[in-house]
Image: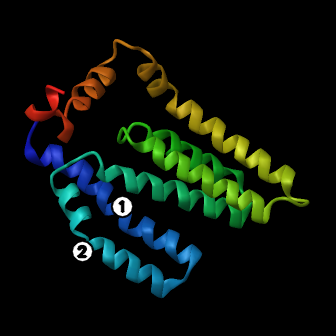
Amino acid sequence: GWTPLAMRLPLALVALAAVPLLYAVVRQGFGRAEAFFASAMLTVSYWHLFYSRVAHWSISYGTITLAVLLCLLRGMDTRRRSWFAGAGFFLGLGFYTYNIYPIAVIAVFVFLAIVTWTRYRGADRGWWWRSIAIFVGVAFVVALPMIVYVADPDSFFWWHVNNYSEVSVWQTAQYKDE
């Protein structure tokens, strides 16, 4: 039902999942001490605690992005395409989390462009591009229902966007007349 527990528990669990995901991502890139410090900071972060407590969808944004990064890093280390498929799944899933998620998608592709430029310009190009194709293909398939929904100009999504576009500091009484 529509109880406070039913509304808050799923997003609290999503927020809780961010802690070990952050640990794994930072450990992969830096080490155990840094990973412990980063995840300890996340557990006491005001932003993280607040948004997980009030059950705001924005808390899922970071968790999903961490899952994408972890899968990509593991895929690059193990050369297993299943990790790239997992990263694509989470990237596609991210479109269902929060309407600013395309910013994270841009950041992920900038990361991939840098990795491509620095690591995979040589002999490993074929493996890398096939892995990226799997990543993009899975992400597209998972995100496709949301893409179709957003493409419909009569969907609730556009009403929601238009409704919030009227909320602005520039929309005060003194600015409306100008």
Residue under label 1: 17
> Which dot, 1 or 2, sits closer to the camera?
2
Residue 155 % position (x, y): 33, 16
Classify 82 as above or below 16: above
How crowded is the residue under tag 1: few (<14 C-alpha within 10 Å), some, or many (20+)?
A: some
Residue type indicated by callout 2? Val
Residue 168 is at least partly visible in this image? no
- Left or right position of 162 against 79: left
Farthest residue toward the bottom?
33
User: Which residue sits at x=53%, y=54%?
Assistant: 68
- Left or right position of 115 against 92: right
User: Which residue sits at x=86%, y=58%?
Assistant: 124
Closer-to-camera residue (169/131): 169
User: Which residue sits at x=27%, y=20%?
Assistant: 159
Classify 119 as above or below 164: below
Residue under label 2: 44
Closer-to-camera residue (121/31): 121
Q: Which mark is residue 164?
A: none
Q: Are marks 1 and 2 in contact (CB under 8 Å)?
A: no
- Look at the image and tell me in which quarter the C terminus lies: top left
- Left or right position of 31 against 18: right
- Look at the image and tell me in which quarter the N terminus lies: top left
